[in-house]
Amino acid sequence: MSSTLKLSLGAQAAQLHDAQTGALVAQIEIGHEAMASRFFTRSPLDAGALERAIDWTEDRIQAAHAAIPAGAQLFTHAEDVRVLAQAAGMDGSQALLHVDAVEQLFSRLVLQAFGQSPHQQDLPNSPRVFATVVFLRELLQHLGFAHIRVETEEVA
């Protein structure tokens, strides 16, 4: 039986909790404000800053690798990830954002950084969106997740 982990995104860090017990499995010292203030302060998006953001993110995600149970599934209620799912063409109360879709979003971001993206393909010009794309791509790649389930948060 595989574990299910809930991803929560914060300004300074991201957390992975066991969905069943609520226990903290890993804290990754990456947050949208932390990354955006370091790397995404210029407009338009700077290709060199994007590369530095990737390196910075990879280092922090690797530290969490040992804490992730083999075969774990990932889900989130994070609105930032929902925005990306919509940008990838997904809608509804539950979307499955596969690693390939995240790679396509990342490719769009790279083209945008180099000024080679058709305007209609541009992601929102937001440091927070840029940070979320980089983080999610590196998270899925380096921790071995095939997808992330994006759910509407239940109101108690």
Image (tube, rainbow, N blue to C red):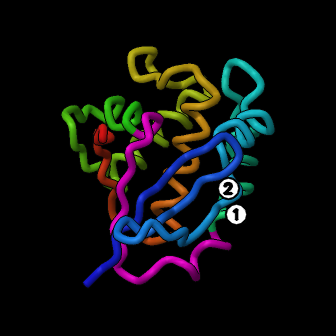
Left or right of residue 2, residue 15 in this image: right
The amino acid marked with disc number 2 is: Thr
Element under label 2? helix
**Number of callouts in the render?**
2
The image quadrant that residue 144 belongs to is: bottom left
The amino acid marked with disc number 1 is: Arg
Q: Does the magenta portion include 63?
A: yes
Left or right of residue 24, residue 6 in this image: left
Residue 60 image label: 1
Q: Position of residue 20 (x, y in %)?
A: 34, 69
User: CB under 8 Å between callouts 2 and 1?
Assistant: yes
Q: Residue at x 39, y 50 (%)?
A: 76
- Tell me if mark 1 has few (under 14), some (14-19) or many (20+) residues whose alpha carbon lies within 10 angstroms of its own: some
Q: Position of residue 2 (x, y in %)?
A: 30, 80
Q: Position of residue 130 (x, y in %)?
A: 58, 34
Residue ID for mark 2: 57
Distance from label 2 to label 1 (Cα)?
Answer: 5 Å
Q: Which residues are magenta?
A: 62-81
